[in-house]
Image (cartoon, rainbow, N blue to C red):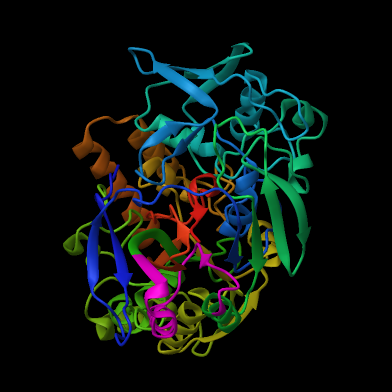
Amino acid sequence: MSTGRPWRVVRSVGLGWLIGALVLLPALATAQQPRRGGTLVYIVTAEPPSFDGHRETTFAMLHPVKPHYNYLVKFDTQNYPKVVGDLAESWTVSRDGRTYTFKIRQGVRWHDGSPLTARDIKATYDKIIFPKEGVISARQAMYHMVQRVEAPDAQTVVFRLKFASPGFVEKLASPFNFVYKAEILERDPRWYERNIMGTGPFRFVEYVRGSHWVGRRHDEYFKPGLPYLDGFRALFIGSRSAMIAALKSGQALIEFRGVSPAERDDLVRTLGDRIAVQEQPWNCNLIVVFNTRRKPFDDARVRRALTLAVDRWGGSQALSQIALVRPVGAVMRPGSEYAMSQAELMRLAGYGRNITAARQQARQLLREAGVPEGFSFTLKNRNIQMPYEPVGVYLVDQWRQIGLNVRHEQQETARYLADQRAGNYEATVDFACDFIDDPDVQLVKFLSADVSPLNYGGYIDRQLDAWYFRQSRTTDKAERTRIIRQFERRLLDEQAYVMYVLWWWRIIPYWRTLQGYKTTTNHYVEPDLEVYWLSP
């Protein structure tokens, strides 16, 4: 697991400067004392398909919804990827690494005034790990090592594992693991898809679709002195120009996902030293998923041809100037502990430097598979402009260069996700974004479709499943790396079930009025509104 670097990048611009100097600052909280009061207004560029963290995979749900909830344990955004207790006061691990015992804080109350107990924690993780029929748990397979969850008393939760699992506490700290009320889940396990009831620092006020989401301070919050803010208001703004205008005017102070280099420079020119910018490698990537249940995408030769046709190195150089994408990599984030070296990457289909030879090979594979010149298909994509639109346009252009005619269809988030889950597409731009650099987390999306709900390609591959479960139990790093490489080669090259395009690069501009904010390698553990405050 990558531990990250003990610094953050802050770009500061004084008057008369176009782009100021990059300064490396120690990862310390600001010297200012936190101040109570005020409402933080921020932007969310898409709307939630549902409100259920256990079901969804998108920031569009997390960014407005997570301030209403707590976690058993969570990532400390000031010291990421350190895990700290949230509802858990403390925990212990047995000598054999198979029993985790958590002591739950007393005095925690739901927003309806009732007390939280260990029964709620157990019910939450039972829903995530052992969902009832008809309930979608997106990350269920990630917890395959859990045998059962127990609540022996009101203040104790015990996880019994089938085998010791590296990084188990980090997996429990997933920012999607909102703790839900047992009584509600027993009555209706899907209630949380359209309703809010948490213990978090902010109570739910209202959601107006197409406009905003509002929360106000939970005055009976169990953490003394927190939150500092009186409330928050998330504005749903899908247009990039409107988003940048809102940031320039101060209507909103931040958007927690990221902007392009050109958008950053525009904000810097306008706002000068009123704005700061933090930049960070991003644990996020756009991938293309092929529907293996439809011809000709059931043929590995066709899928391999499509990945061979894409010039990732040239794309990185061109797209990084206009979009928030940059590094070339495979399944594990470039620069992280288990990432492929460049030499290893270049042995995969679509990662070589000779794009002319790769496209000749792609055309030959298409001919062998019986795909005619000018074959047409539709690439479905999300209607979030950055970086989905420029990457989608780039892919269409790359495939035209091997004689294919591709239609680019962009969809609103809820429809986009519904079509992916239903298999209503030929090829789709998907995202592979995660909350930590851990093979169990990164690889789970690509297990067989009957094992992982995150697999939208429809393929069944027991070899990938076997390698996944084997690496999860392997404590020797060299052996674990070897298994991960086998997994990546089969996924991206031999079978080409999916293709990785480019990894993202986070650029977060924000008004200096916002204090306590610190970026991380992902846009899922943020925002952490209980620790932010506003300066005068």
**How far across and down, in percent of the image, does residue 154 sit?**
64, 13
Q: Position of residue 409 (x, y in %)?
A: 62, 79
**Residue with the most extreme top position:** 152
Placement of 402 over or under 303, stated as above or below: below
Q: Give the image location of residue 168, x and y in percent.
A: 41, 30
Q: Can residue 108 be seen in this view?
A: yes
Q: Quadrant of residue 70?
A: top right
Residue at horizontal 61 percent and vertical 35 percent from the top: 128
State the residue in front, 207 or 468.
207
State which quadrant residue 403 falls in. bottom left
- Is residue 293 shown left or right of residue 33? right
* Residue 354 position (above or below residue 126): below
Q: Quadrant of the N terminus?
A: top left
- Residue 277 on the magenta segment: yes
Horizontal relation, residue 50 to residue 294: left or right: right
Say which of 3 and 56 sits in front.
3
Query: Which residue is the extreme one toward the right?
Result: 187
Residue 30: horizontal and vertical position, in percent? 35, 52
| Residues drawn in magenta | 249-278
Q: Is there any visible trace of residue 432 in the rendered image? A: no
Q: Would you say 343 lies left or right of 229 here?
A: left
For the point 34% across and 14% down, which residue is it?
96
Who's the residue at 45% across and 87% down the image?
Answer: 397
| Residue furthest out toward the front | 536
At 52% across and 38% down in the image, what residue appears? Answer: 141
501 left or right, relative to 460? left
Q: Looking at the image, which is closer to me, 56 or 493?
A: 56
